[in-house]
Amino acid sequence: MSAGRARLSTRLMVSFGAALLALSVIEIGVRVLRPQVDAPIETPALLRGQFREPGVHPNRSGEFSVQVQVNRDRFVDREWADPQPGVPRVLVIGDSFVEAAQVDLEQGFGRVLEAAMGEQRGALVEVLSLGVPGAGTGTALALLDVYAPRLRPQLVVLGFLLSNDVLNNHPLLEPKPDKPFYRLDGGVLVPTDAQRSSSSAWRVPVLWRISHTWRLVARTVVGRQLSLQSLERGGGMPLDLRVHDPAGGSTWDEAWAVTDALVGAMAARCAEQDISFATLIFPSQVEATQAGRAAAVQAWPALEDWDLDAAGARAHAMAVQHGPVLDLTPALAAGQHDAPLYFSQDGHWTPAGHRVAAEASASFLSELLAPAR
């Protein structure tokens, strides 16, 4: 080998070694600071989200650092045992607010609600949390069909997130292929499909399996793509804020109609099994807090001319046709000055937010159960 080739080979080896060292340092940093669960970007309809593998997983951001506990049924909750005689069981079905992966398990809505209801009744109550991120009411209906016969609750509670549960139910507003969608045909719910997405292109098996950095980059890029798509579909503002748009539109009207039918279907399924059914309306920080509302209006001035309470009233009027309803907006608005109730960047409830929401729900839901003996 000539001297020139030897020098080139040496430089290439040194460059490769330096690059490998840099990537290793980055990988170690990600594993320590932002560990990434080995779960696919796209998952089956009832198992979507990062935290679906049984066990304990770290979840860290600039606003929280927690250990997420996933049970054998692949939900963020403690393990579910068989029903106990004489102990009423409550099933709370909803999205990431019910999942509560941003706080410790005992600080989440389900666990705080269980303690508060038990204190109210002076007797044990069991609360099971079925939270699926970005679920929509179509997923909630499917969860009810799959899990209610086995878990045998006395009460099913739908946690309805006002800011996005309506848009979650229309494939043109949120075209995610990994969850069920419906359309109305002559007043009857008919399954329909969403458009395919390209996020699976990041699912390179070897890299995904071994590298936390690859998972972080993939999820960051896909999340950015989804945010840009939301802004595009929302005409320059996040699409979820369009639920407050007084102009509405045919697609939003269809989404509200499908949502109404899905909530009605959940109530009917519960009635068939002699299960009580109720809805809790979960507000976002835009609907519930002065700071959240002010920040949104500053970012998107058009909101100043919109009635940001109208959608909540519409959701209440819709849900009350199918069973008891409690809107948690007043309780969260009243508690906003005691402690931050929402993570300002992440948007989910803080431990204080979960506590206020759960304690406000306890009396309302306790009255829907048979009196304690």
Image (tube, helix red, strand yellow):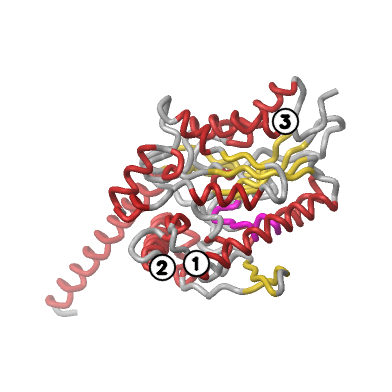
Residue 244, quarter of picture: bottom left
- Is 277 or 219 nearer to us in this picture? 277
Asked whether the residues under the numbered discs 1 and 2 touch, taking CB atoms below 8 Å apart as contact, a structural biologist would say yes
Q: Can you see residue 221?
A: no
Closer-to-camera residue (143/185): 185
Region rendered in magenta: 132-142
Q: Which numbered disc flags the more N-terminal residue, 1 or 2?
A: 1
Question: Horizontal and vertical percent for residue 339?
Answer: 42, 27
Taking the spot 41% from the left edge, 68% from the top edge, the residue there is 233
Q: Label 2's element?
A: helix
User: Which callout, 1 or 3, points at the residue further toward the start of the chain?
Assistant: 1
- x and y percentages locating residue 169 in the rendered image: 58, 62
Q: What's the CA distance linking mark 2 and mark 3? A: 41 Å
- Marked residue nearer the N-terminal end (2 or 3): 2
Identify the residue shown where x is 69% and y is 21%. 119
Let me know if residue 322 appears in the view. yes
Callout 3 crowding tier (Cα within 10 Å): few <14, some 14–19, many ≥20: some
Q: Amino acid at mark 2?
A: Arg
Residue 366 bears which disc, if any? 3
Q: Mark 1 and mark 2: span between their CA atoms?
A: 7 Å
Residue 203 point in image, percent of width and height: 48, 68
- Tag 2 residue: 233
Which residue corresponds to mark 1? 173
